[in-house]
Image (cartoon, grey):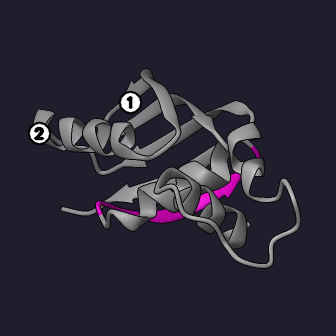
């Protein structure tokens, strides 16, 4: 998976990876768009909500993000993302705004870092 993400990043930059079999670099472009639920706990203010929403929108491959549910300090977002939960999780965690709290098929759980 990591090599596929690297190939996708290089393809976006217009670069190639020597030694790859024909068509291997184009695989990233064919990744399906999948729906993922992202639960974030510790969202205590409008500023926290805006920061998480902004970060979700900045992850490469994210096409759409909407709020699915709000309960106390927990917000569940519904995201449509190329590459599914794996791609979204890798991109979201790279920002340092949230810490992984758990995962199940099609659903990621995080704690907001204040």
Q: Using residue 19 as the reference point, say whether residue 34 is left or right of it.
A: left
- From the top left corner, tell me how far across and down residue 20 is, in percent: 81, 71
The majority secondary structure of the magenta stretch comes to strand
Residue 103 on the magenta segment = yes
Chain part drawn in magenta: 97-105
Is 87 within the magenta? Answer: no
Q: Is residue 30 above or below residue 16?
A: above
The residue at the point 66 percent across, 55 percent down is 86
The image position of residue 14, as x and y in percent, is 51, 55
Q: Which residue is mark 2?
A: 47
In the rendered view of the protein, which quadrant contains the N terminus? Answer: bottom right
Which of labels 2 and 1 is toward the front? 2
Residue at the extreme bottom of the image, as rendered: 19
Disc with the residue nearer the chain's start (2 vs 1): 2
Name the residue located 78 percent from the left edge and 49 percent from the top edge: 27
Q: Which residue position is annotated with label 1?
A: 71
Q: On screen, 24 above or below 70? A: below
Horizontal side of residue 7 vs 67, given as left or right: right
Q: Secondary structure at mark 1?
A: strand
Could you give the CA–CA distance between mark 2 and mark 1, rounded to whole angstroms? 17 Å
- Percent x, y of residue 26: 74, 49
Q: Position of residue 4 (x, y in %)?
A: 71, 63
């Amino acid at each position: 998976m990591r090599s596929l993400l690297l190939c996708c990043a290089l393809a976006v930059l217009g670069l190639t990876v020597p030694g790859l079999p024909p068509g291997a670099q184009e695989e990233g472009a064919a990744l399906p768009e999948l729906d993922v639920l992202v639960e974030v706990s510790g969202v205590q203010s409008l500023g926290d909500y805006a920061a998480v929403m902004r970060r979700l929108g900045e992850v490469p491959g994210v096409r759409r993000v909407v709020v699915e549910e709000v309960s106390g300090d927990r917000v569940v977002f519904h995201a449509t993302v190329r590459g599914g939960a794996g791609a979204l999780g890798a991109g979201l965690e790279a920002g340092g705004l949230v810490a992984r709290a758990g995962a199940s098929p099609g659903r990621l759980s995080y704690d907001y870092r204040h």
